[in-house]
Amino acid sequence: MNFAPILPEIILGLGAVVLMMVAAFVRRPSTITHVAAIALLVAACFALIGAPQTAGSVFDGMWAADGFAAFGKVIIYLAAAVAIVMAHGWFDQNHEHGAEYAVLILLSALGASVMVSASDLMMLYVGLELQSLSAYVLASYRRHDERSAEAGLKYFVLGGLASGILLYGISLLYGFAGTTGFEGLAAAFAGPNGASLGLLFGLVFTLAGLAFKIAAVPFHMWTPDVYEGAPTPVTAFFAAGQKAAAILLATRVCLEAMGPATDQWRQIVIFAALASIVLGAVAAYGQTNVKRLLAYSSINNVGFALVGLAAGGREGATAVLVYSAVYVVMTLGAFLCIMRMRDAEGRPLESLASLSGLSQTRPLLALALAMFMFSLAGIPPLFGFWPKLMVFQAAVNAGLQLLALAAAALTVIGAYYYLRVIKIMYFDAPAEPFAPARGKVETALIAVCALIISPLGYLLISPLTTAAADAASVF
């Protein structure tokens, strides 16, 4: 048996098991943290280098080892590595930061990796549940924090409901298509009489289950509470790596398994895209907690990614890949800045009011956070403008001009709450200054993310777009 296509997953799986055993004897979270981050970086290198040699379907068509999966895995692994590193300086080292944190991130990244490589509904569900079960524990990681426990419980209950909906959709697809493989499903949808009513019901339920994982409206209700209650490094991973994996999974399912039924699922995706953009923008207006605000920001940005998915084809998939990559960088940068929000006693702060006058007390931190806010809003010349332009262009080229115009107009609504954060930092009276910054690694990561989304990021347009187009050529 050829294990080369799953070498990144083998590295993560073995790494999680070994670190779990080592943690029983080594009580230094820093050691486990460094080894776990290195394992993720090594897995990312193997995913990047090994993709051309292992392209195609393997394991009886249940696993896709292609450029699309490799692109997604690199994003996921890097986001997971950052989430592990940033946690070392956030948790209380004596009481909270245990070795199991890095192991759970590794297992969640492993599940996300399986998700983007799945070319069979059974493999899809295995990866999704592995990722979700780890996420439920991560959300409630702070055992003595009521908000964290509440976040984990809500995520678990609603996640179980979404899994049931997804399984029902999978059972319908299997019952009417006779297969769970993506190729077989595509053949069933392309039948001589078109998709049957049973297949369409299966399509709807399957997309509903996936919509929960990407927090698209109307299955977004868990996002604000979970993002607020979960530890900040965990929230960063949920908003970046986990979100990217779910979006790419939905893209593969729609374009590969349900490609012949594009006219049917496109209606659902267009509704979810516009509803997510509107709700993500409007619901963020009255938020006073910065993590809840970024939760609605993630819902808003999912809507723009779905605009690219609605376009379909290679161009739409390319736009989704580029959007996911840039969104991960912007989100991680924003959460790295939020981690610096601590009072004089070192306790984390999350209120928008605590950012008042930050430009006077911490000018460089205020500048970095302002750049991430402007970029998330898609305001040029920052790099966040480019992926939005790509999804709009893909929609126009697919004949969805009204969708592109509506999404472009709605960006103005969403820009308000990003500008509100900047107004608080630069024009309000200074609040109590934050505690002195700790962690040179986190400072370096903020600087790297800021450079990528700055106008210098446009130097990456050609290699990033080319890599995404090559990865999307599988559709």
Image: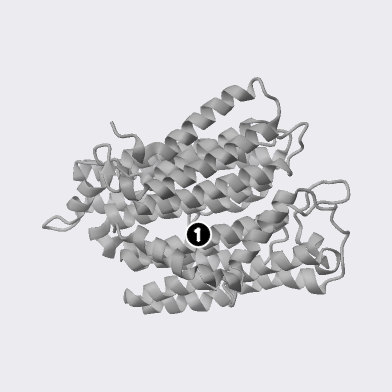
In this rendering, is residue 413 above or below 101?
below
- Expressed as whole percent of the image width and height from the top left, the position of residue 117 reads 37, 45
| Residue identified by numbered label 1 | 325
State the residue at coordinates (29%, 57%): 474
State the residue at coordinates (26%, 58%): 259
Q: Secondary structure at mark 1?
A: helix
Is 432 on the left or on the right of 216, as rendered? right
How packed is label 1: few (under 14 Cα within 10 Å), some, or many (20 or more)? Answer: many
Which amino acid does the dot numbered 1 rest on? Ala
- Expressed as whole percent of the image width and height from the top left, the position of residue 350 reads 75, 54
Is 405 on the left or on the right of 60, as rendered? right
**Residue extending furthest toward the left:** 192
Residue 241 makes an appearance in the image: yes
User: Which quadrant holds residue 457?
Assistant: bottom right
In this rendering, is residue 25 above or below 253?
above
Residue 377 makes an appearance in the image: no
**Residue toward you, 405 or 385:** 385
- Expressed as whole percent of the image width and height from the top left, the position of residue 345 reads 88, 46
Is 363 on the left or on the right of 212, as rendered? right
In this rendering, is residue 315 above or below 434?
below
